[in-house]
Image: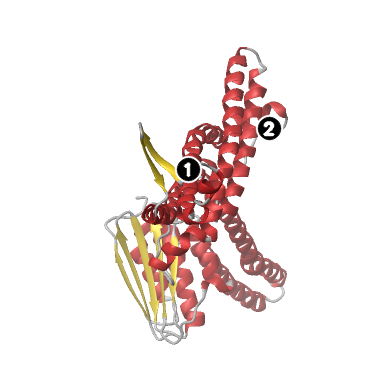
Amino acid sequence: MGNGMGGIDGPGGGLAAVLRAPVAARTWREFGYLLIGLPLSTLYFCVALTGVALGTGLLVTFVGVPVLAGVLLVCRGFGRIERGRVRSLLRMPVAEPAPVRAGKSGPLAAMGALLKSGSAWRHVLYSVVHFPWAVFAFCLALTLWAYGWSALLYPLWFWVFPAFTDQPGLQLVQNGEYTFYLDSPVAIAATCLAGLLITLATPWVIRALTGVDRLLVGGLLGRTRLDDRVRELESDRGVVVDTAAADLRRIERDLHDGAQARLVALAMDLGLAKEKLTEDPAGAARMVDAAHGEVKVALQELRDLARGIHPAVLTDRGLDAALSSVASRCAVPVKVSVDLPARPVAAIEGIAYFTVSELLQNVSKHAGARGASVDVWKSGGRLLIQVVDDGRGGADPRGGTGLAGLSERLDAVDGVLVVDSEAGRGTTVTAELPWRA
């Protein structure tokens, strides 16, 4: 109801807002919305009720299926009209509902998808439920509007009665021989005052009536939480797929440019050493010794690559030991504090590890810090991570940096990343993940 029944506060609010309300553009838009709503709602009601009754009755034959599907499709069109009316006249943004998706192509699949669509049936429900409300809102708004303005302006038109009829004024009461006319100055003034009160109250009544329409349109014709969740999961799935593909490309590149290249060079050196073994044993021994050093380097690169995929220390000893290992490789001193009652699931634990690892890499490369700290704890059903440094600050996740990609990764598992980085005052990054023990 925040958009529907806004108050009279703000600049120029209070009594001034009450006095302006009868002639305000918003009041006229909302009044027009209620007036237009009755004929449209009558059409919606007749089409929906007739179509559903006809389609249901014909379900004994196959004809009922396309009739019902057609009614659902038409009602979705009605919903599009209503969303447009709400956006233009009530100034309320309404998200489009999720599209109806058929698993297969063809008319039968499309009809089946429509019949199974909860959104389409909500449009039918709106078409039926809104009609009695539209009748009530139309009658109340029009009655108050007509009586209020007529009474308010009565001093300007009461002369019509003595001029063109045999009555001195508007007849208000007739009981036998007693008749009361609004013809005296006191009666005219009282009528004008009553009209003023009704006119001033009518905009707020109209606002309350359109508030109900906002609820109906938003609840039945808009995008539901389930639709938003499905869209969010689809987006998260895309992020996960892209991240996995990028990780695979990185691993392939590291293998090709690192260990694979060293092993190829090692094989060539050993081949040359084998040829020199009989002719120059000393030279062959030197080549074998150099190859032995290359083997050690290649093994270290493979260990680093394996650690980048999933470190063994994390699997064996948990976050505390794994994060301490990461901190020991940071370019600045890092204090690590892990206070967890148990270990979360491996997936969340791995994300937490790589989150801290990437944040500490940023500290080493970009922060210009003298020290940092890592705190990990559980709060309710969430795993919280906070990395703080005393560097130059000014980190902005919206600038297309690694923080933006990290935020997308956390969002893919319902996580949150918050960055507080004021220039010259260091950076505090807080990550929140679901616990899922």
Q: How many marks?
A: 2
Dot in front, 2 or 1:
1
Could you say where residue 134 lies in the image, as x and y percent from the top left? 51, 38
Tell me if label 2 and label 1 are in contact, CB under 8 Å. Answer: no
Could you say where residue 32 lies in the image, as x and y percent from the top left? 57, 49
Residue at screen point 46% across, 37% down: 136
Secondary element at tag 2:
loop
Q: According to the image, what is the colour scheme of the structure?
A: secondary structure
First-in-chain label (2 vs 1)? 2
- Residue 385 occupies quadrant: bottom left
Secondary element at tag 1:
loop
The circle on residue 167 is 1
Residue at screen point 48% across, 58% down: 22
Q: Is residue 282 above or below residue 424?
A: above
Q: Is residue 169 above or below residue 122?
A: below
Residue 1 visible in rendering = no
Q: Is residue 307 left or right of residue 98?
A: left
Residue 279 visible in rendering = yes
Residue nearest the viewer, comparing 322 with 220 = 220
Residue type, mark 2 in image: Lys
Residue receiving disc 2: 104
Q: Is residue 391 left or right of residue 336?
A: right
Residue type, mark 1 in image: Gln
Residue nearest the viewer, comparing 437 with 319 = 437
